[in-house]
Amino acid sequence: MMKKIAIIGAGVSGLLACKHTLEKGFNPIVFEARSGVGGIWSQTLESTKLQSPKSFYQFSDLAWPPSVTDTFPDHNQVMDYLQAYATHFNLISRIKFDTKVISIDHLITTSDHHENVLSSNLWGGSGRPFSPSGKWNVIVQDAQNPSSTEVYRVDFVILCIGRYSDLPNMPEFPINKGPEVFDGKVLHSMDYAAMDNDVAAEFIKEKRVTVIGFQKSALDVAAEVSARNGTRHPCTLLFKTTHWTVPDHFVPLTFRSLNRSTEFMYHKPGEGVFLWLLVTFLSPMLWIFSKVLEFYLKWTYPLKKYNMIPSHSFLQQISSCMFTSLPSNFYDRVEEGSLILRKFKRLNFCKNGLLIDGEMTPLATDIVIFATGYRSDEKLKNIFKSTYFQKHITEPAPFYRECIHPRIPQLAILGYSESPAVLYTTEMRSKWLAHFLAGKFVLPSIIKMEHDVLQWEKCMRLYAGEGYKRHCVSASLQIHCNDQLCKDMGQNPKRKNSFLAELFAPYGPSDYKNLSQDCT
């Protein structure tokens, strides 16, 4: 009997999971809370565009249309591209729109005790994707009619709920020093991005707006507000920690340098003595590259003038998946006075503004927008009905091959890991997962998977330092990660047609286009 697979979410990772499971002969059902595909791309700022070059943010089996000529397409072009992918591979009919998954619950359908199955040294008791006794109940809710719920029983669940949606991270404040005492409006960047363009423009019109944060969403919101309101009502960007930001023209150069030869400068888990010596010999070049780039950025931008020189190195930052490109004309707006930058250590609300670092005079403002990220691990934890699984979704969540939790059977998580090229990274893991579901290989023991995760953590901490994040797939070792996936699938990891190209040519999605048809 055909196994039932549930995919939760119809963003980039959900579409990829659907396409590749279909390709292996399965009939997946996709649950999407919104009324269309695209995930976070369906609700974003008017000015949002890709951070990675489109050649690295593309499906291996569907090129961007010739009409898209920009290196960094805008969000409308990205949405059209995702819609074209869903249409081209007939995915729309598989998706139940306006259907929100409120919880999932694992159950044992035979006389086996739940604890015995989960305590086995093999994932799900066998190391295989399906179990004769293990099932998942997927409880869904009609988004238009929340009182209407339905339960689907499936053999495997693929979570594609992403990191940057649904559950915003709002800072906590002491009593009587938070938003409740403020006469203005307080919201998260998620709520601002969800507004229609005309509504957002009217919302901030002739208002004093303060944006809090310094990641990509904070920079984009601040740039958009300052462009709309100008110098008459300047936007203030408040931040605790600064990060290195790079100009758009630098990003394609960085991605083109992602080849096997540069990966010889990084230590990897399980490397032999020769490779260890080679990396030790070459690794000073990374330090030189990092320092040269930092000098260039400090020379190009007025970082010292505005107290914006980060305390960490550029190498540490990219090893933590914090690769942020600068919005167009960002520092021009700072220089003209439509955007004000200010660093802070402590922040409280008062009746007509914000009290910064204990100052008595408040920063007068009408609107405060928190661009402070999302509680993604809590969102992931909350979807499980069982407290047994909830306690295993910890920070950092230990995912084998960045998509399998060793202690949660018959379930995979796609699109949760960060990467400078998310679509590229997720597509590789979608192909790997489809091969696994088709029975092409078996997972190692739980102990071996957890050991592998710890080895990767130890390796990545060498470069990321305090900024280490377990859910980061470093661009610096993207090819090495893909090699592991290819070997698991029984595919040839060497994708180029010559020795020199294999060493020095960049790797991208197109190199893995015919992965399913290859053999070693």
Image: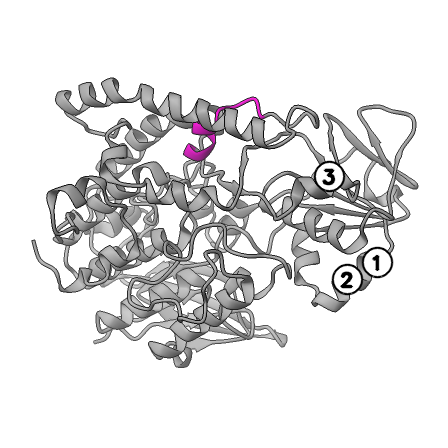
- Residue drawn at x 65%, y 55% is 190
Task: Provide residue 99's location: percent of width, then percent of height.
Answer: 52, 73
Q: Is residue 414 left or right of residue 35?
A: left
Q: Which residue is mark 2?
A: 201
Q: Which residue is mark 3?
A: 334
Few, some or many residues within 10 Å of mark 2 (<14, 14–19, 20+): some
- Residue drawn at x 40%, y 50% is 421
Secondary structure of the residue carrying tag 2 is: helix
Give the amino acid at mark 3: Val
Task: Provide residue 446's location: percent of width, then percent of height.
Answer: 25, 40
Tell which tag, 1 or 3, sits nearer the viewer. Answer: 3
Task: Provide residue 183's location: percent of width, then percent of height.
Answer: 91, 47
Q: Can I make out residue 43 in this image?
A: yes
Judged by its main secondary structure, the magenta piece is helix
Q: Are marks 2 and 1 in contact (CB under 8 Å)?
A: yes
Q: Is residue 263 above or below residue 279?
A: below
Estimate the spatial distance between the alpha carbons at disc 3 and disc 2, rounded to whole Å: 20 Å
Q: Which residue is mark 1?
A: 205
- Report the magenta residues as a range: 310-319
Estimate the spatial distance between the alpha carbons at disc 2 and disc 1, rounded to whole Å: 6 Å
Estimate the spatial distance between the alpha carbons at disc 1 and disc 3, rounded to whole Å: 19 Å
Secondary structure of the residue carrying tag 1 is: loop
Chain-order first, disc 1 or disc 3 = 1
Q: Is residue 154 left or right of residue 103?
A: left
| Residue closest to the far left | 520
Give the amino acid at mark 2: Ala
Secondary structure of the residue carrying tag 3 is: helix
- Residue drawn at x 18%, y 63% is 516
Chain-order first, disc 3 or disc 2 = 2
